[in-house]
Amino acid sequence: MISVLRIPAVHVDAGAIHAAGWIALVDAQPEFFKEVRLPRVDAVFDHHPNKTRTRVRFCDICPACLSTSSILAGYLAAQGIQPTRRLATALYYGIQTDARNMQRWPTPQDNGAMLFLQKRASISLLRLIEVSQYSLGRLDYFSIALVKLRYARHVLFSHIGPVPSADVCVQIADFLVRIKEARWALVSGVAGDRLVIVFRCDGHLKHAGRTAAAAFGGLGSAGGHKTMSRAEIPGRNLPAGVTLTGNEGIERFVLASLARVEREFRPLLKALPE
């Protein structure tokens, strides 16, 4: 989406954050940033459950909405601002993506936002984004994931080692959860100086966000929605004896941590080689 719509997204460091005249968090809350100390937060727009205890100048958190894009589109509509084609397409794609991964119907606010954005969004660009999610360079990681795939009692797990970005784990997890036998699909990888664990599940009597938070929330950032979530753990927070380069140690650490909070992961942990 960033490439197709030419979105000028850039990484910022602590210096840029402290120098900023205005800090707004979109699809996130101050409590989500455990590794970065924010000097302040001026505005928050989010659809995740409210965890904010930080005082902010403006806060719009609406867990009933499927997507933060619906919230932002509502402001444009209320002010009579017609979004550009690229902006409308990005917001519409955001609602589409969240709607596919949430197990509930869109709210009137979601439906209203989609109707508003349909007038400006580009169907051809939406299609291009959807069919261009993989590159040739990333197919190798799918091969690694399949070779290292572990399975037991409806749980799929693959640790693929170093990855150029966490998005690789996301794409592979989205693929694995479509396997008929899978109720859980987990993919982990090492992105820079941290361990990333991506969760997908069918949502039946399960909650991926709560599972991720319970297993890894004390070590890093962890949480998400009912059927999709993620944990990111800095290497320095891993237990003694577990390193980012030790694949077998990471496998055992991930499954042991999950087995302590969910019984479904115990068979896969027992199946690991000694």
Image (tube, grey):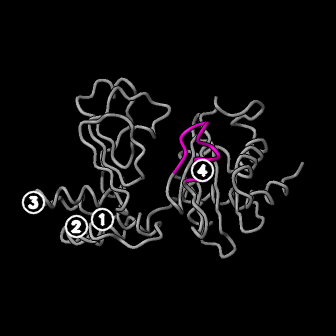
Where residue 91 sits, quadrant-wise, is bottom left
Residue 26, given in percent of the width and then of the height, sits at 33, 47
- Name the residue that disc number 3 marks: 80
Q: In the structure shown, which secondary structural element does the residue marked by tag 4 occupy?
A: helix
Q: Which residue carries the number 1 mark?
A: 92
Is 143 left, or right, of 266 in this rendering? Answer: left
Q: In the image shown, does 249 or 86 lie closer to the viewer?
A: 249
Q: What whole-number distance in Å separates the C-alpha atoms at marks 1 and 3?
A: 17 Å
Q: Badge 4 is on which residue? A: 212
Q: Is residue 199 left or right of residue 161?
A: left
Q: Where residue 76 appears, x then y in whole percent?
A: 17, 57
4 or 3: mark nearer the eye: 4
Describe residue 227's horizontal placement relative to residue 41 as left or right: right
Q: From which residue to which does the magenta span run?
A: 210-223
| Closer to viewer: mark 2 or mark 3 | 3
Q: Residues within 10 Å of mark 3 (few under 14, many from 20)?
A: few
Residue 192 visible within the image: yes
- The Cα atoms of the two marked residues, 4 and 3, are separated by 40 Å
Tags 1 and 3 in contact by the CB under 8 Å rule? no
Reading the image, the residue beneath label 2 is: 117
Q: Is 224 colored magenta in this rendering?
A: no
Judge the density around disc 2: few (<14), some (14-19), many (≥20) Cα neighbours within 10 Å.
many
